[in-house]
Structure formats: structure tokens, C-alpha cells
Amino acid sequence: MALFITALNSGSNGNCYYVGNNNEAVLVDAGISCRETEKRLKRLGLSIEKVKAIFISHEHSDHIKGVSVLSSKYNLPVYITYTTLKQSGLYLNKDLVKSFNAYEGIQIGDLTVKAFPKLHDASDPYSFIVSGNGIKIGVLTDIGSACEHVINNFKNCHAAFLEANYDEEMLENGNYPYYLKQRISSNTGHLSNNQALQIFKQHKPEFMSHLILSHLSKENNCPDLVKDLFLKHAEQTQIIVASRLNETEVYAITEKTLEMAAFKPNSQYTLF
């Protein structure tokens, strides 16, 4: 049995990550519109009816701007901490608002979602591990530096969405104002390509089959540059770069093999 994952969008213009099995799925963040979420799931051959909950990592607009409409239209519970909700300005049906605590397992059908703290310049930020069928998927973006929570959870992932936000030289020589460069490169900002690579090199488990590099900066990074950087150390792990313009393919993650092909809607397999 597999878990199926895709980044519907990843970048400062919007973030939304899908993890599901054959029966149900969750979204981690909903930073693109409801209409775009629907369109991208449909293009991938995924049913939005299988989405049973939305989990919110923090209150920045690129992670929450589609939440209210999605939740209302599909009657989806939104798992969000009280502090994040207070800072977000979101208007949600109070009956659909669910809180969570660090390392508390939340059951969504046969999926279990656990949140854990991270370092980021938000009020109460979390990353997530979504597990099911013996498989663990990490959603590890918007991280200023690799704290013990990030490292310990990354070590257990069969696949992960890992932030690789900026190339250090591009950021330093770019046109961003000094205060913004400082914010991005701080311990509560974003992970650079090299910081993400060190996590990968030092803590990747042997069974990690897919790494999806996520939340790339439009101005301070280059997809080819970061992919080439990771490919040198990938071994059997497939390296994918998530786009800020469209969805990735759907990847089937299993315990049994590191050589899973990307699922395509017109393939011979009926997975959904």
C-alpha cells in the first residue's frame, strides 16, 4: 500500500501540499485559491472529495489565503493552533476549527498527522509528519534553521517536502533590501540550498525514496542549480523541484522500493 503526494504549489506566491491514500487525503496549508486547488487536483486525477482536512503550519498569507473558501465549500475541518488563528485574520466556521498540540497524533481515516515545532518568524509555527500504511511523509518548509525537531523527524521520512529557499550568493548579490536579506537568512527565516543539503547529507535515511525541494525563491534561487546540487548526493533518492507556477506529478511512496515511478493519470494503474 502506498501514500500519494504532490505539491500543488510551492513558493512565496502560495503553498499547498497533498498527502493521501486510496481513501482519504489531507492538505498541508492552502495558500492558493479554492479554484486553483480544484483545477490542479483535477488535472492530476485526484478527487477533492477525498480531502478530509486542512492542516495549517503558520499564518503567513502564502499558506492560508485559500483556507476559508475551501473549508466552507467542502465542509473541511481546519487544524490550526489558537495563536495562529488569532494572528491569521481568517474567518472560519467555528464548528470546523480544530486545534492541535505538538506530537499529538490526529487521526484522519487511516492517516495520522503529527505536528512538531520549527524555527520561523511566525507566531506559532509547525511542520508536519503525515503517516499511513507504515509510511511517513514530512512537510518541512518555512524553516530558519534545522532544530532537533526537524532533524529527528527528517530521519524517519520515506519522502519529504524540504525547503531550499535561496542560494546564498544570489541572495547576497541580489536587489533585496538589507533588512529583507537579514530576515531570510536568519535562524527564523528560510533554509538556504546549502543548509537544506546538509540536512539531506547528514540525516537522510536509507529508505528515503523521494525528496521534493520546496519553497524556492523566484529571485534568489534557480531550479536547475539546486537540483544539480542535490543530485550529486542523491544516490537512490529521487530529487524533484516543486514549482511556484504549477503542480508536481503525483508520486507513490511505499516501504518496499526506492524506485517508484511517478503516477500519471493515464497510466495502466488505477490508484484512486
Image: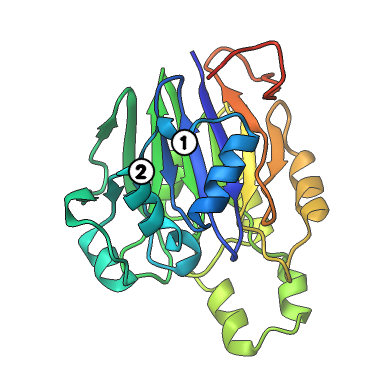
Q: Where residue 176 sits: x, y (%)?
A: 68, 83
Q: Name the mark on residue 74.
A: 2
Closest to the observer, 110 or 161: 110
Q: Image point 76% across, 52% down: which residue? A: 226
Q: Image point 82% across, 51% down: which residue? A: 224
User: How is the protein colored in the picture?
Assistant: rainbow
Closest to the observer, 132 or 92: 92
Q: Quadrant of residue 212?
A: top right
Q: Image point 31% across, 64% down: which residue? A: 124
Mark 1: few/some/many CA within 10 Å (<14, 14-19, 20+): some
Mark 2: few/some/many CA within 10 Å (<14, 14-19, 20+): few
Q: Where residue 241 sits: x, y (%)?
A: 70, 46
* 3D distance between C-alphas at marks 2 and 1: 9 Å
| Image-based side of 121 in relation to 225, left or right | left
Tag 1: amino acid: Ile
Is residue 1 at all visible to an observer of this figure?
yes
Q: Name the mark on residue 48.
A: 1
Label 1 element class:
helix
Tag 2: amino acid: Tyr
Q: Where residue 62 sits: x, y (%)?
A: 51, 64
Image vertical order of residue 91 relative to residue 213, above or below: below
Q: Image point 26% across, 48% down: which residue? A: 102
Check contact, mark 2 vs mark 1: CB within 8 A. yes
| Image-based side of 266 in relation to 215, left or right | right
Which of the two discs, 2 and 1, labels the residue nearer the N terminus?
1
| Image-based side of 41 in relation to 78, left or right | right
Is residue 152 at all visible to an observer of this figure?
no
